[in-house]
Amino acid sequence: MRQSRLFAPTLKESPADAEIASHKLLVRGGFMRRVASGIYDFLPLGVRVLRKIERIIREEMNREGAQEVMLPILQPRELWEESGRWSLYGEEMMRLKDRAGRDFGLGPTHEEVITALVRDNIKSYRDLPLNLYQIGAKFRDEVRPRFGLLRAREFVMKDAYSFDRDEKGMRDSYHSMYRAYSRIFDRCGVRWMAVEADTGLIGGDVSHEFMVLAAVGEDRIAHCENCGYAANVNLAGYRRESITGKARPLELVYTPGRRTVEEVSSFLEVEPRYLIKCLMYLVEGKPVAVLVPGDREAGEVKLERALGTPEFRLFNDADWECHPQFVRGFVGPVGLDGAEVLADLSLEGAQGMVCGSNREDHHLVGVEVGRDFKPTRYLDLALVRDGDPCPRCDSSLQVAAGIEVGQIFQLGLKYSQSMGCTYTDEKGQERPVFMGCYGIGVTRLMAAIVEQHHDDKGIRWPLEVAPAHVHIIPLNYEKEERRRAAEGIYRELLESGLEVLLDDREESAGVKFADADLYGIPFRLVLGKVFEESGELELQVRTSGERVIMSPQEAKNWIMEALTGV
Ligand code: ATP
Ligand code: MG
């Protein structure tokens, strides 16, 4: 590539809407441009990086026996009605009508299309197992598109779907994808972690998310360095320690106008953890009281799992009015009528607690759980915090921020049952297919790589995903013999199979180096003063900042060696 002809315009300033490094640097480095909120153009260098990531993904998917297909973005409503997701998916799906008024959606994911394809084209156990994948555009009308490629409305995803005869087959497919993902993220040069995850709108029972550790990540991961336990904080467990507040007899105390945990805790001079927070939820139309210690939050994902339905919400003003028996601000589990009571595991046997009394302006102190009231169930409801005890060993958990670059699911029979995807077994009996699905956010991964590999001047691409291997930077390019020498090295490196960018512009050293920093190509060969004196050039390593003077031949060998195994 000749830089004079390259369409990769760099910018001195970051775009006004860019808040994070990857967004700023990918735009400034001429890798991408914004078209509209959450929608981007990819320029030639951006496409080169994307194709490299895709190549790694293809190689590793193929290695596990997955086969590539291409499925349509435009999907008919009827298929989504079969799974029940036409209404469930809500506003995140972009919808449109054709000229005859028929409804279509732009695929946010492809379970429906692929299940129909496989259902209509497999017959017997001999056709299974099967693993099909594609790499292509997905559309999601996100509430808040932001952070550039991290949360876009049109983005590239690799999605794969496995079809197996039975549960064991499904688990094997899942593990094979887990292995493929591990290699993919390793090869992309990121520090990552697989964590236990919720299945959300996709469904199924078992799921892992692959997280790239980065401060800007929107996800929070709880992990234990000692035993390796790792889970998304929205469902991570932690070992509960018994809670024993000040021993005192059960007593009604006057707490005028003190409604919140903070107000009650400072008024009674009791630490928040000795309070029982009683949250009123409306679950499928019925009131449910959810109890957690006063210093903890109840997790909505944990709650959804405990309740077995996504149809619940915290009481709103109208709900409080509809249920006057619950005294807002003073509601508590002792003597509570007309609501199921779910308590966090940590409250089992808790003593010396403070809670609402169901009487205006009063709380109860000296409450003992189990003695003064019995919850319907004890469940894992409270959210984990940094430093909590690990649920699997004696160590403690750390909470870190991560970017979800992939997620894998054991779907079980969710789609095969609703959509009738079956096969006949050895005995001629019809059985539903066990499915799994596996996504990687390809464009999000590209941004996540940048989040981990940059400095304030630009990107530092890991070798295997870099837009090129070598950047030749001849200074004083207007000099005829400099130009000839650079051309010679350029040709030789190309002939060795290297990907090379030659800065053949008559620009100042400052301009050339600033652009080179933004492009972030791993190896730079600078032809300057030293070259004039001794025929040697300066090899600069973008990642380490290392600079070594050597002959062009030595530089070539150095780079070829770094590339072995890539
Ligand atoms: P998130 O929780 O971040 O919204 P998700 O769990 O809805 O993501 P999946 O349905 O698991 O996403 O999709 C598979 C992968 O696609 C994700 O792991 C992520 O890497 C990527 N992805 C999802 N939504 C977006 C988006 N809006 N922009 C870019 N990549 C995305
Ligand atoms: Mg996900």
Image (spheres, rainbow, N blue to C red):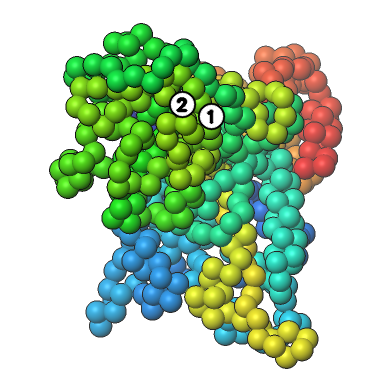
Crowd rating for badge 2 (residues with CA inside 10 Å; few <14, some 14–19, many 20+): many
The residue that label 1 is drawn on is 349
Which residue is located at x 76 percent, y 82 percent? 126
- Look at the numbered discs 2 and 1 and tell me whether their residues touch, using CB distance below 8 Å: yes
Whether residue 73 is visible here, answered yes or no, is yes
Q: Is residue 505 left or right of residue 562?
A: left
Residue 242, above or below 45: above
On the rendered image, what quadrant is the C terminus found in? top right
How would you rate the neighbour count of disc 1 (Cα within 10 Å): few for under 14, some for 14-19, many for 20 or more? Answer: some
For the residues marked 2 and 1, what is the alpha-carbon distance in whole angstroms?
7 Å
Residue 4 position (above or below residue 296): below
* Quarter of the figure with the N terminus: top right
The disc label shown at residue 368, or none: 2
Q: Nearer the viewer, residue 31 or 217?
A: 217
Q: Position of residue 558 (x, y in %)?
A: 82, 29
Q: Residue at x 24, y 17 (%)?
A: 255
Looking at the rendered structure, the kind of residue marked 1 is Gly
Q: Give the residue displayed 70% in from the left and 23% down from the top.
A: 395
- Residue 396 at x, y percent in the picture: 65, 23
- Secondary structure state at the residue bearing disc 2: loop
Q: Secondary structure at mark 1?
A: loop
